[in-house]
Amino acid sequence: MSRPADATRLWALIGGIFAILETGMIWWRVGTLPLFWICLVWATYLSFLARRAQGGLARSLWLNCAAVIAALGLCEAALWLGERPNPYVLPAGTAIGGTFAIPGFFTIMPAPGIGYRPRAPGSATAVKVANGRLLYSVRYDVGPDGLRIGAPAAADPEACLLMFGDSMAWGEGLNDGETTAFLIGQFSQGRVLARNFAFTGYSAHQMLWLVRSGTVRAKAGCDPRRPVIALYQTLPNNIARVAGLRGWDDYGPRYILAGGAPRYVGGFDRGQYILRDRLFVPRWLAGPLSRSVVYSRIFGRDRRVRDFDLDRFAAVAAAADAGLRRDYPRLRFLAIVWPDLSEPAEPRARQVADLLGALGRRHVPATTIGGLVPRFDADPAPFLITGDGHPNALMNRVLAQALRAREPALR
């Protein structure tokens, strides 16, 4: 055996050991683009092997392997550079303070089944500041039943309001007495029992879990012989939440479509369903795979919303509607769609139209917020908390009056 061959094998061994050690160090210590750097290490090592290879076949083999790995690394980098910003990360100069922002003080996470919930009973202050300017300073109160405090109702109310949804329905940035649910109960002078099952970040999957688990029936206190109005406030970005995308809700209930109907399969933390729910990736494998930008953007939680997600969202909303109708024969359900004012990734009208089309196919009555309050579409600024995007006290008051005009049972 010649000395050049021995030296080549020695350097190949040393380089291989170095590449393995460097791979481990990068995997455990580098948080951004670890696979890009790992691919760079191995592409360099394989290129070295190709250069020192004795035969043409071996040289071609090592070069092709290096090219494939380098291409994968470039894909990781290219997708990372084109990554959309996380819409749930506060912009620079904006901060939310108060006890609401203290982890575990007011929000319990994880919470079995639903993913997370407000502490019951509990109270929290919420303060939002942007570039030194106060946007709001409010207090949230939750009763022993886990629902936000509502207006007092008569001993034998004539009708019932069930409010579902995310921060728009919960009343983020508003005091208890300024939310739509509270105002409807107050305007009715106690004739309507208004129950607010919404919470910041909730979507149709939490609504369905509340219905199917019996939580709504147990906590609502509604007389099934009387009219019941169920309102679900949502945004187009809620489609991604139901699919478990973009990391807002790490523990919420996951529903997959089985024969066109939603089936509960545990929390988002259990693992990921990919390829139109055909393949389950358990948590122990989904975690490492999610460190790849290619996997995350194509299969994982950072992928774009697809038509299948739209169908899933519509099916979940329709199943919640159907479940409520079984408990309350005189139920009237209405989905109210707000525009994604802070996430203009697509034209607003298209987002809303697509969402309404999906809900329509499932026979769930739905309207845009502009359909209830036409002035909102003309100029939304007076109806939103300045610098925040959530509906302000005026908007909630106008919406409460519009809903009372639409639904006689709420008057």
Image (spheres, grey):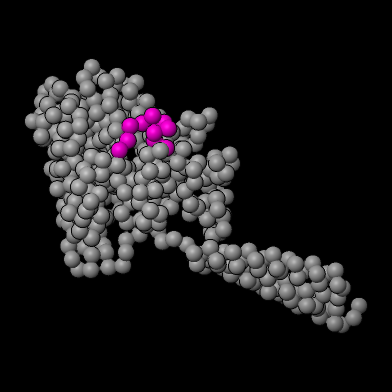
User: Residue 10, percent across and down?
Assistant: 78, 77
Residue 364 shows in this picture: yes
Side of 106 where 351 appears, left or right: right
Q: Residue shown at 32%/56% (left/top)?
A: 342
Image quadrant of residue 225? top left
Which quarter of the figure is the N terminus placed in? bottom right
Which quarter of the figure is the C terminus placed in? top left
Q: Residue furthest left?
A: 189
Q: Residue shown at 11%/35% (left/top)?
A: 186
Q: Is residue 302 above or below residue 213?
A: below
Image quadrant of residue 143? top left
What segment carries the magenta color? 358-367
User: Residue 115, percent across and down?
Assistant: 38, 42
Side of 96 where 348 appears, left or right: right
Q: Residue shown at 32%/64% (left/top)?
A: 91
Residue 108 shows in this picture: no
User: Residue 351, percent across and down?
Assistant: 39, 48
* In-front residue for pair 211/98: 211
Side of 396 where 266 appears, left or right: right
In the rendered image, residue 366 lying in the magenta stretch gets the answer: yes
Side of 23 where 185 appears, left or right: left
Q: Residue shown at 39%/48% (left/top)?
A: 350
In the rendered image, residue 35 lying in the magenta stretch gets the answer: no
User: Residue 276, percent across and down?
Assistant: 55, 41
* In-front residue for pair 10/116: 116
